[in-house]
């Protein structure tokens, strides 16, 4: 995505060489500075807590630093690495399931000829918009009947339902920005509908769909209530630990867990941006 | 398209099969509500002990989160299994809060097991028989007893209030220096409000015993009005942990807390050593955590043995009292003999045994309790 | 034409069936309990109770979400526009990395971070005092409604900016180039060429953010203080404290109605817009 920005802005740059840019430049730098402070402030707070051992009023900073809580998180009894692994597997499978069903749905819903379009769109909003607290029990009951409780598949399905809101809505937005003229041209030149879809339409919608993958991945990685109802006790993921530590004010454990979860999220984003950049996809189409 | 879906489903099912194969040994599933330290306690202290006694058994512990919400999740999971008519349920031992424990008994989710284990006789507290008006005799074993009390920073508060009346006067002199978390945000605030009703509405004894009388509630109008006025002089905190947090940062100097949480925070260096506790008249409620085992636990025998170990005097002494400074679940006389007097006295350093027996109340029966909360919502916060 | 419509329906079917079986069916039990008494007879009592007890909270929730969404729309458009239009390569690079950071921090951790950051004697005020910008007397606590808004905006900014930047950079470059050649200022390009075209994405980002904010429980629980509070917290309270699913579900209905209302408004608007250009 960044590459596209760069081409646009270098193009704009060419045209603007003779404009009074100095003032604008400093203004933008100022904006970035303020923005960075706002962003980093809370994150610094998080980082400090990961290495805090003793911190109380009236000390402005911790009075004792150390890695005590890191040892606690990684002690031999807690299976952090295996729950992290489960979390990642679940998140990746969730992304796959969401992609499989939401790409066709997003494509169909981007057509204005689609009957009851608003109805469908609102339908996919329900799982996120309707508070889940009261629904999970019923889902768990259903899953016990199907024998899905305590299986990876069950957890993946529950996460997918929530991910669908992101993947469907964003896919629809992505597909509706595609150029209908190109599609028509391709069909007129004798290309089949499937060929046209994969080679003409999909590459155009790819940036949006990729973004939706990232959100689905993150959503799944942070989910814990559904995981408990459907997965526990056989499946344990990291966010469950994060949740209880955070709610009871065990800031160290929560911060460290959050840091651990940061690793797969950022890796996933980098990989997906690297290997599935829009340019790559459009090349695949040629 | 559909073949793709099929492949994905097959792959997922395959992985699911694989994971269930990996757990061929006997697994005892323990679900625990409450803080991370309780989960860690089972994981790092009880489980290794139990596994050593029972080779081939692995204890798998799941924490469901602090507060009633954590217990409620266990209740809902069990009741989902009950309504699906499963022959075997996937939780063997659960640690739950008092109120939810009562609810589970009345919904028929729990096994009556106390007479089957040796440590069953060691229990003396009334809370082992009665959970907010529900008869739970035989279904539960207390893990530890927790109490709410007023925490204060002794650097700034030299003479802590001794009663609700004194507290009200204190907050008038020091506006915004007292903080609690309302009632929607954790039980320490609920306890404070319950204590308020004990003080200005109806006494604890009437409210904690049956029969329920709907008319009692009508006398609380004045108490709630007084509480509403009181609320203007105080700071609201975000949650149980939020109260401790604000105490720690010196934003408030006094507030109701759970004694067990207070000690954990103090031990972790998250509140200053100058923090002290006071239990004020006419008393604030406390509640036990229960060990329970579901009716259709997959390993009923192991579950009973696990609870027996967890409630044995030695484990209660070493694990609960020495490790956490928490009040033991079984009768104190069995625990005391296992410990040196210094450790035992530490338990009462902040709150004397006399105060505890005089001002340590239990929660009202469920219907009154709901009346208190709903009255607060209607008359205080609305 | 008929063939085409049914083909489109087939494409939506897998996703729709998934939602129907795995969510709508279980949801029906909840909806049923929102409008029935324990013995199964129809009643509006629970909805009535929700409004009677929680009308302030409903209003509060709507206000919080509205303010957050407006701030989000403004900020994320500015950042996205800077990234796409700024002539300074370094600015674009830094901003491109910066804005994504909150994306990876779960809501619950954000809430916890903010609690110790925004508090009266929290890290933020401490930093201001240490740098001499403030005296200990002037510090105020941001816990409460302002803290909730700050947390929501902080966390959701990455989400909406990512979507909007994507939409902006997918735009046809030749249009921008043409406008440039005609001497249009960057501001004009933004408001007259880019914004109208990315409106659907902006709308989606805002609708999804609204839904997310309405459903997050940890932020109102950990940052909100006293009353009023957000409906998600009320719902949790209703279930966990009273075991009262009826009123909780009725509140859920209200919450969904708010989300659906906004989504419907957006969808109608965007459909109309499309009709006009086509």
Image (cartoon, rainbow, N blue to C red):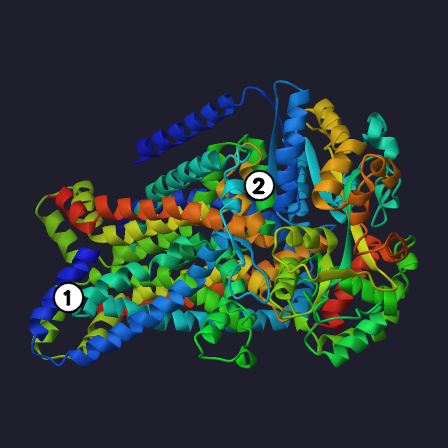
Chain of the residue that carries numbered disc 1 in the rendered image: A
Q: Residue at horizontal 21%, vertical 57%?
A: A2
Q: Residue at horizontal 72%, vertical 25%?
A: B300
> Is the residue marked by circle 1 packed among few (<14), some (14-19), or many (20+) residues within 10 Å?
many
Give the CA separation, mark 2 to mark 1. 49 Å
Foreground of the two, A38 or A198? A38
Q: Secondary structure at mark 2?
A: helix
Percent position of residue C163, x then y: 31, 60
Percent position of residue A47, x then y: 44, 55
Q: Is residue C271 left or right of residue B149?
A: left
Foreground of the two, A229 or B155? B155
Q: Secondary structure at mark 1?
A: helix
Q: Quadrant of residue B3?
A: top left
Q: Is residue C3 visible?
A: no
Percent position of residue A137, x then y: 61, 44
Foreground of the two, B130 or C254? B130
Image vertical order of residue B44 relative to residue A58, above or below: above
Q: Are marks 2 and 1 in contact (CB under 8 Å)?
A: no
Q: Is residue C161 visible?
A: yes
For disc 1, the marked residue is A9
Q: Residue at horizontal 82%, vertical 67%?
A: B196
Q: Quadrant of residue B134?
A: top right
For disc 2, the marked residue is A229
Kindly indicate whether the residues beneath marks 2 and 1 are on one polypeptide chain. Answer: yes
Image vertical order of residue C181 relative to residue B93, above or below: below
């Amino acid at each position: 995505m960044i590459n596209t920005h760069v081409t646009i802005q270098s193009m704009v740059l060419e045209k603007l060489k003779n404009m009074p840019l100095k003032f604008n430049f400093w203004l933008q730098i100022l904006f970035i500075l303020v923005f960075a402070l706002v962003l980093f402030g809370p994150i610094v707070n998080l980082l400090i807590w990961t290495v805090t051992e003793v911190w109380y009023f009236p000390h402005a900073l911790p009075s004792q630093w150390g890695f005590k809580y890191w040892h606690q998180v990684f002690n031999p009894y807690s299976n952090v690495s295996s729950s992290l692994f489960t979390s990642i597997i679940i998140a990746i499978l969730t992304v796959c399931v969401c992609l499989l069903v939401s790409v066709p749905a997003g494509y169909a819903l981007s057509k204005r000829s689609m009957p009851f379009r608003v109805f469908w769109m609102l339908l996919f909003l329900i799982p996120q918009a309707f508070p889940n607290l009261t629904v999970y029990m019923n889902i768990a009951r259903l899953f016990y009947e199907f024998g899905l409780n305590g299986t990876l598949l069950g957890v993946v399905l529950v996460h997918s339902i929530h991910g669908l809101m992101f993947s469907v809505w964003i896919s629809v937005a992505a597909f509706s920005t595609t150029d209908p003229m190109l599609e028509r041209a391709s069909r007129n030149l004798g290309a089949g509908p499937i060929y046209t879809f994969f080679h003409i339409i999909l590459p155009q919608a790819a940036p949006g769909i990729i973004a939706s993958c990232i959100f689905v991945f993150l959503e799944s990685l942070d989910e814990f209530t559904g995981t408990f109802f459907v997965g526990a006790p056989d499946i344990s993921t990291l966010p469950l630990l994060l949740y209880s530590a955070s709610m009871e004010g065990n800031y160290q454990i929560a911060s460290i867990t959050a840091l651990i979860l940061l690793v797969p999220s950022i890796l996933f984003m980098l990989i997906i941006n690297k290997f599935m950049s829009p340019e790559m996809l459009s090349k695949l189409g040629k | 398209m559909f073949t793709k879906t099929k492949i994905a489903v097959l792959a997922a099912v395959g992985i699911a099969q694989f994971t269930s194969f990996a757990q061929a040994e006997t697994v005892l599933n323990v679900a625990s509500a409450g803080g991370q330290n309780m989960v860690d306690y089972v994981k790092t202290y009880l489980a290794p002990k139990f596994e050593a006694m029972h080779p081939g058994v692995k204890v798998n512990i799941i924490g469901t989160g602090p507060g009633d919400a954590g217990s409620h999740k266990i209740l809902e999971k069990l009741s989902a299994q009950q309504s699906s008519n499963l022959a075997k349920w996937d939780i063997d031992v659960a640690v739950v809060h008092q109120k939810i424990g009562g609810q589970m008994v009345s919904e028929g989710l729990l096994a009556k097991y106390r007479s089957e284990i040796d440590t069953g006789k060691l229990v003396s507290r009334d809370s082992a028989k009665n959970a907010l008006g529900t008869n739970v005799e035989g279904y539960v074993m207390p893990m530890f007893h927790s109490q709410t009390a007023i925490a204060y920073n002794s650097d700034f508060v030299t003479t802590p209030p001794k009663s609700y009346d004194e507290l009200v006067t204190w907050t008038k002199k020091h506006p915004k220096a007292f903080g609690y978390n309302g009632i929607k945000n954790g039980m320490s605030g609920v306890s404070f409000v319950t204590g308020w009703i004990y003080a200005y509405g109806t006494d604890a004894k009437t409210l904690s015993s049956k029969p329920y009388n709907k008319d009692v509630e009508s006398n609380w109008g004045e108490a709630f009005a007084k509480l509403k006025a009181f609320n203007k002089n105080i700071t609201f905190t975000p949650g149980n942990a939020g109260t401790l947090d604000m105490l720690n940062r010196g934003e408030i100097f006094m507030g109701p807390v759970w004694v067990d949480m207070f000690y954990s925070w103090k031990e972790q260096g998250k509140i200053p050593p100058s923090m002290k506790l006071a239990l004020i008249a006419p008393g604030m409620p406390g509640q036990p955590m229960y060990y329970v085992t579901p009716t259709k636990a997959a390993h009923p025998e192991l579950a009973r043995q696990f609870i027996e170990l967890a409630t044995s005097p030695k484990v209660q002494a070493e694990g609960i009292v020495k490790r956490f400074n928490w009040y033991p679940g079984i009768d104190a006389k069995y625990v005391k003999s296992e410990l040196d007097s210094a450790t035992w006295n530490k338990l009462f350093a902040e709150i004397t045994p006399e105060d505890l027996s005089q001002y340590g109340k239990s929660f009202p029966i469920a219907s009154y309790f709901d009346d208190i909360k709903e009255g607060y919502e209607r008359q205080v916060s609305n | 034409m008929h063939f085409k419509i049914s083909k489109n329906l087939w494409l939506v079917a897998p996703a729709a069936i998934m939602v129907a079986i795995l969510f709508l069916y279980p949801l029906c039990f909840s909806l049923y309990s929102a409008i029935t008494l324990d013995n199964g007879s129809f009643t509006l009592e629970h909805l009535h109770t929700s409004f009677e007890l929680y009308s302030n909270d409903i209003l509060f929730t709507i206000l919080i979400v509205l303010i957050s969404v407006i701030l989000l729309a403004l900020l994320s458009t500015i950042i996205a526009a800077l990234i796409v239009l700024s002539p300074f390569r370094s600015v674009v690079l830094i901003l491109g990395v910066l804005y994504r950071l909150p994306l990876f921090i779960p809501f619950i951790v954000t809430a916890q971070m903010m609690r110790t950051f925004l508090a009266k004697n929290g890290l933020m005020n401490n930093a201001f005092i240490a740098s001499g910008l403030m005296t200990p007397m002037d510090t105020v606590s941001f816990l409460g409604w302002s803290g909730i808004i700050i947390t929501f905006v902080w966390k959701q900014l990455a989400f909406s900016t990512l979507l909007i930047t994507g939409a902006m950079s997918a735009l046809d470059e030749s249009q921008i180039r043409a406008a440039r050649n005609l001497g249009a200022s960057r501001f004009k390009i933004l408001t007259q060429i880019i914004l109208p075209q990315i409106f659907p994405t902006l709308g989606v980002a805002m609708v999804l953010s609204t839904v997310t904010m309405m459903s997050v429980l940890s932020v109102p629980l950990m940052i909100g203080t006293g009353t009023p509070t957000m409906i998600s917290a009320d719902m949790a309270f209703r279930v966990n404290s009273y075991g009262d699913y009826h009123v909780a579900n009725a509140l859920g209905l209200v919450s969904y109605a708010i989300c659906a209302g906004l989504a419907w408004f957006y969808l109608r608007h965007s459909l109309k817009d499309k009709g006009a250009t086509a």
